Image: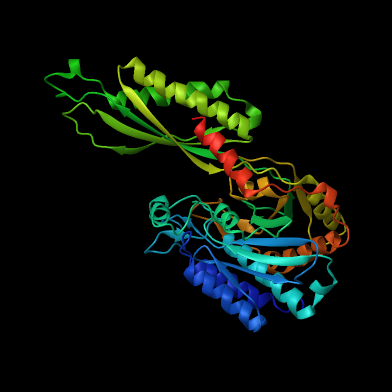
Amino acid sequence: MSFKEQYEEIAGVGQTIFDNPELGYKEFKTNQTVADFLKKVNPDIELQSFSTTGLRTTLGSGKPLNIAFIAELDAVYAPSHWRSDEATGAAHNCGHYTQVAIALALYKHYFETKAYEALDYSLTFIFIPAEEYLDLAYRDELLGSGKISYYGGKPEAMKLGVFDDIDIGLCVHAMGGEFAERTIEINCDLAGFLYKHYTFTGKATHAGFDPFSAKNAYSMSTLFNVALGLSRQQMKDSEKVRMNPIVLESDMSTNVIPNRITVGSDLRTQSVDYMKEAASKMDDAAKGSALALQGEVEIKTQMGYLPFVQDRYLSEFVMEAFQDNEEIARIWNNNAISAAGDIGDLAFMMPCIQIGYSGFTGTIHGDDFKDIDPEFIYEVFPRFLTQVLERMSGRIDRSKLYRRTFAEYEQLLASIVGSH
């Protein structure tokens, strides 16, 4: 069946997922939608379940190379989005619902045409939960009960061995903004991030009667915010550093000098080494702010995701396919941004690429985000992906691939968090 013939069905699946957004590790309806579709296409399919809602299946097992096409199941917490879930606040304003539909379009095409048999590699479809780093209280519960070990779905799947036999990771992702022409993107590197917790403590006294012997924790946090603002001038432009301090916890009233306040901030950089350097600068700013007002600060560091450097060798196949394609007008190349994703963690272990695609309007993670060119998203773009995959067949140079172990991954995370 051609992509044109299956377009209405695939677009309908995408709409169903869009209308039923779910947060990470809770994508039970989405999991069922995916499983039902795959079983309808292939009643004899072997589906592996993992990480509460993850699914995996392979076409053409037993070949010497295995390429994974990865789709993310979860939505964002965005209760003000025009199509959010009223009960949970979840909304698909990151485009993951289209990833899932695109993956299903590819599976149906390859299975029904048997085109996967001509590929010299196995093609594994991995539907993965919890890419978005949010709803952390719930994930803390899962961590506490031993149901997961990582906030992010890809690191969790890595730990479980879901990627043990995978050699290459291929992802796709919606491009934010509206484009005059149908556009794709390659080599868009992403930031990595840490999450920092700074708890300032001082001394509480009556704000009117005896403010003189107090040590104002709120003032320490205010000084810290000023220090961070001034420090931005000393951060490398090339690293696209982002810090966003917010008050996480405080128990204040107007008649008592506050003696405790917790400020949280992410820290985004393009490289691990600079992440460590910038984290040290943030910590010094917090320590100095506390010291300046005779207080103290407790610092905790929580790992987010690693920076994502796209594999330039694999992107060459995408560029080749684009140059021979007459349906896609433009390609963006080498635009690093400060958004992050757990694809960076997977790319530490193996070469990965993430191809961007237009067809949307509004802001990624914004209240106005929606698709406006479903024909491109669900028909033209999946067909283009088969052209990329066909060019990879028989031409992948194994010497240009790499493989690291999960133990090495854990050691890297420990070196980042442990140094701060």
x, y (%) of residue 248? 35, 39
Left or right: residue 251 versus residue 135 is left
**Colouring mode (rainbow / by chain / secondary structure / one colour):** rainbow
> Considering depth in this image, is 326 or 231 the residue closer to the camera?
231
Left or right: residue 403 versus residue 202 is right
Q: Is residue 275 above or below residue 181?
A: above
Kindly tell me whether residue 325 is visible in this rendering. Answer: no
Which residue appears farthest toward the front when viewing the image? 407
The answer to which quarter of the image holds residue 41 is bottom right
x, y (%) of residue 314? 79, 51
Q: Is residue 290 above or below residue 114?
A: above
Tell me how many marks there are: 0
Q: Is residue 55 above or below residue 333?
A: below
Residue displayed at 80% across by 67% down: 63
Residue displayed at 56% across by 30% down: 276
The answer to which quarter of the image holds residue 44 is bottom right
Kindly tell me whether residue 106 is visible in this rendering. Answer: yes
x, y (%) of residue 284? 46, 21
Quadrant (top left, top right, bottom left, bottom right) of the N terminus: bottom right
Residue displayed at 23% across by 28% down: 258
Residue displayed at 40% across by 51% down: 140
x, y (%) of residue 385? 76, 63
